[in-house]
Image: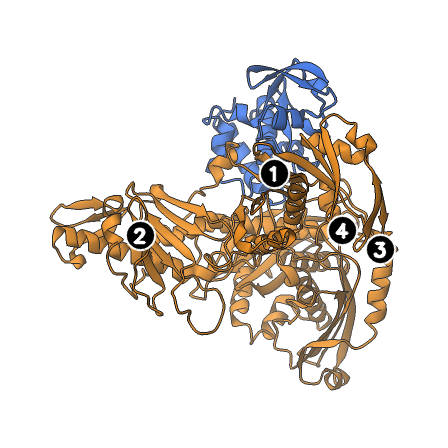
Amino acid sequence: MASLTFFVNGTRRVVEVDPDTPLLWVLRETLALTGTKYSCGQGLCGSCTVHIDGEPIRSCVTTAAFAADKQITTIEGLAKDTSHPVLKAWIHEQVPQCGYCQPGQIMQAAALLTKNSKPTDADIDSWMADNLCRCGTYRRIRKAIHAAAEGGAK
Amino acid sequence: MTTLTVSRRNFLKAISVAGGGLMLGFRLPTGEEGPAPELFEPNAFLRITPDGIVTVIYGRAEMGQGSSTAVPMMVAEELEADWKLVRIEQADAHPTKYGSMSTGGSTSVRNFWTELRKAGATAKAMLIAAAAQAWAVEPASCRAQNGIVTHPSGKRLKYGELASAAGKLPVPENVPLKDRKDFTIIGKRMPRFDIPPKVHAETRYCSDMTLPGMVISSIERCPTVGGSLKSFDASKAKALPGVKDVVATDSGVAVIADSTWAAFRGREALTVSWDEGPWAGQTSEAIWRAFEQRSLESGTVNKQTGDTLAALQSAERIIEATYTVPFVAHATMEPMVCIADVRAHGCEVWAPTQSPQEAQKRAAKALDLPVEKVTVHVLMSGSAFGRRLESDFVEDAVRVSKAVGKPAKIVWTRSDDMKHDWFRPATYNVLKGGFDRSGNVLAWTHRIVGPNSRGLVVGGSTPPYDFPNLLVDFHLIDTGVRLGAWRSVGPSQNAFVIESFIDELAHAAGKDPFEFRRHHMSTSPRLKKAMEFVAEKSGWGKKLPPGSGRGIAAVESFGSAAAQVAEVSVTAEAVTIHRIVTALDCGPYVNPDTIEAQVEGAVGMALGAAMKDQITIKEGRVVQSNFDDYRLFTIKDLPECEVHIMETDNPVGGIGEPPLPPATPALCNAIFAASGVRIRKLPFNPAKIR
C-alpha cells in the first residue's frame, strides 16, 4: 500500500492504494466515480477509457502508480459541463442503447476532437476502432462526432 | 385501500392512491387461456399524482432496446399527456402483480399495443369526466390535450388538479382509441428517457451500487459442465490485502473481498482441484463428428408436408448441401453481476435481469424461503440479448450473501462471462432440394443435428415458401455445452441455412433469386411484400460493376417481416460490404428512431457472428476468454445501413430480433453473386473467402 495523489476532474485526492491497482478500480471503488466501466479488464474494449493529461488511456491496464500526480479526467469530469459539444451531440443523435460502453466511447471521442477538429469518417473509424459496442451504435457515434466537430468541440 | 366493484369483464380498475391522485390498474395480456379470475387483477399501472406527473408502472426491463420510452409513448398518446411530465417506473419482481415480467421475444411493446393505449384513453375519459363534473358541463364539450382539460368557456384544469377527483369516478369501458393518422407521439422520433442519464454517467448499473457492509466476491467455478469441487487451498489468497475470506458454495469457490480488484487477485491466488465430471474430454471436433454421424439417420419429424422422397425422385435436378453454424456467445458489454442481501427471514436482490420472476423463484429455492420473502429489483442491463434470462448470477449472489451473512456483490470477470455463457447452439444441417424443368421447387428436406434443446435448435426451421413437399427433421445430442436464447434464437441460425439454400436452388435453376423466392411465396404474403419493398428500395436488378453483387433474404419472426439486401464487392479473396438495406414490416411502429437503432445493432450482431469468432470446446472447457480470441464487430466493420420501416396495416410485430436473421444470408448470397463462392460454414473470414 502507498499514499498516492491523484488530480481527478480538477480535484486533488490522496488515497491509500496498492500502486499496482489498475486505475479503473481506484476510480470506481476508492474514489466512488463509477461512470468508468469494467468490461474486459485487458484493454481490449475501451469501456474503461479516461484521459490522463488529455490523452485517452485504458484505465483497466494502467496502474495507479502511473496515474499518480497526473491530471485525470473521467466521464464525470466531462459531464460537469453538460453543454460539452460531444455530450450534446451524443444526446441529439440518440447514440446510446444499453449505455454501458458509452462513457468510454465519449471519452475516446472527446480526445479525438482535441487533436483533430474536423475528422473524416476514416479518421473516426481508425481512432474509435478499439472501442467496442455490442449494441452496434457505431453509425450514430460517427454522426455524433461529426456533429460535435461542427458544433465546435473543446 | 381498495373499494371497487369487481367486474370480470373490466380490464381496468381504479385504485385509490395515498396522497391523492388517479391510479388505474389494467390487465395486459398474459397469453394464458382459461376462465377469467374471480377477482380482477391488474398487471400494469398508470398513476397520475396531484403534481401532474404521469407514471406508467411496468414489469418489463429496459436493456437498451428502448422499451422504457416506447411503452409510455403508447399510454401518453391516448392519454393526451404532457410528454414532459411522463415517466416510467420499473416494477420489482412479483409472482403475479405485473403478469409475465420476462423481457424477451421482442414482445415488450407489441404484446401490449392495444392495452397500453386503452389504459391511456380510459384515464383521459375519467379526467374529462372529473372536469365536466367540476364545471357542470357535458363531458363531450370538454377537450383534453397536452395534460390539460379545457372547455370553450375558457375553463381549464391540469391533469394533476383533476387526478384525485377522477380516481373516485367509475371506470368507463370500451373507450374509443385514436386513428393512426391522429397520432402526435406514436410514430414520432421521441427522445429516449434513458439516454441523457447514460450520456451524463448518471445511470446506475449493478456494479456501480454499494450497500453498507457489502462485500465483493468473485467466484472460481468448475471449468467443465457437470463437474464438482474436490478441494482448494486458499492460504495465498487469504494473505492478500483486501481478501476477507474464501468460502465454498454451490456456485464455486468464492473469494470474499472489500474491493473487486482484491477479489480478482484472490482468485488468481487460489489453488482449486475439480472433479471435472462427465464432459471433461469433450472437444468441438468430437461434437461435429457426432453431429455429422447422426445426420446419416432419419430424425424426429418437426414439419412434414406431402412425400418428399417421391417428389425428389421426379425432380429434374436435385441440389444437396451441408451447412454448419457454430456456438456463439452473448458477450454483453456488462459482464454478469448481481447483488444480494440475505437476512434471517428474507432476501433483497438487485439484478440486471430479463427474468425477474424466475430470479425470485430461484433465489427463494436457494434459500428455502417462500417467494414472497424475496424482493428482486430490476436494474438497467448493460445489454442482454437473452443472456440475462438465466438466473445463475442471481444464485451466485444469494449463495455468497447467505454464506457470509452480509450483502454481497458478485462480479464476473470477462473470462467468466465468456466461458460460462449459455451459448447459441451449433448446428449441422443437411439439405436437399429438387425442382422441375420450369424451376418450381418440388421438395425441400432439411435435417438439423444440434445439441439438446429442441426449441433453440428447431425454431424458425420451417421455410416461408409454399413447397408442395417438405420434410424438416432433427436430432438432438447432449454435448455438455450450456445452451441459451441468443438474440433472435432459432431463426438466427436457421434463416442463414434456409435463405442460403433457397438461393442455391434459385441459381441452380437459372432464376433470379428474388423472383425465385417470390414465385414460391404464396403462403407468406406479408413477407413477400416486405421482400418486394426491399428489392425496390435497393435497386435490385440494376447493373453493378464486375466483382460486385447483391444478395437478398427474407425472414418472418417474432411477429414482423424483415427483408434485407446486401451489396458487396469481392476482389481476389476479400469481401467489402457496401451496404445492407432493410425493409421492416412491424405493423404500427412506435418510435422509428429506436427501430433504426435496433436494426443497425441487429445487423452488426449478425455480421459479427458470421465473420468474427466462434466458441470452441477443448478438454471440456470453453476455449475463448476475452475480446482478443472472441472478437466483436467494430466501428470499422459496420457497413452502410439503410433502414425502411414499412407503412402497413398489419398486426404489430417486434423489432429487437426480427432484423437479425436475414442479415447473414443476405450477405452470403451477395458474396455468391459477386464471386461464385458459396459460404456454407460460419464463421468465415471476409479477408479470405477462397
Say what amino acid the circle numbered 4 marks: Gln
Front residue of B631/B172: it is B172
- Amino acid type of disc 3? Gly
Q: Residue at x 73, y 50 (%)?
A: B611
Identify the image quadrant of residue B539: bottom right
Image quadrant occupied by the C terminus of chain B: bottom right
Query: Circle 3 — which element?
Result: loop
Residue highlighted by disc 4 = B614
Marks 3 and 2, how far apart at CA? 57 Å
- Please tell me how crowded label 1 is: few (under 14), some (14-19), or many (20+) other residues with Cα within 10 Å: many
Disc 1 with disc 3 on a shared chain? yes
Proximity of marks 3 and 2: CB atoms separated by less than 8 Å: no
Write down the residue under mark 1.
B407
Dot 1 or dot 3: first in sequence order is: 3
How far separated are the C-alphas under marks 1 and 2? 35 Å
Q: Chain of mark 3?
A: B
Which of the marked residues, 4 or 1, is nearer the chain's N terminus? Answer: 1
Query: What is the chain letter for disc 4?
Result: B
Q: CA separation, marks 1 and 3?
A: 32 Å
Q: Nearer the viewer, mark 4 or mark 2?
A: 2
Residue beneath label 3, please? Answer: B277
Looking at the picture, tell me which residue is in the foreground, B91 or B605. Answer: B91
Chain A, chosen colour in render: blue
Among numbered discs 4 and 3, the one appearing first in the sequence: 3
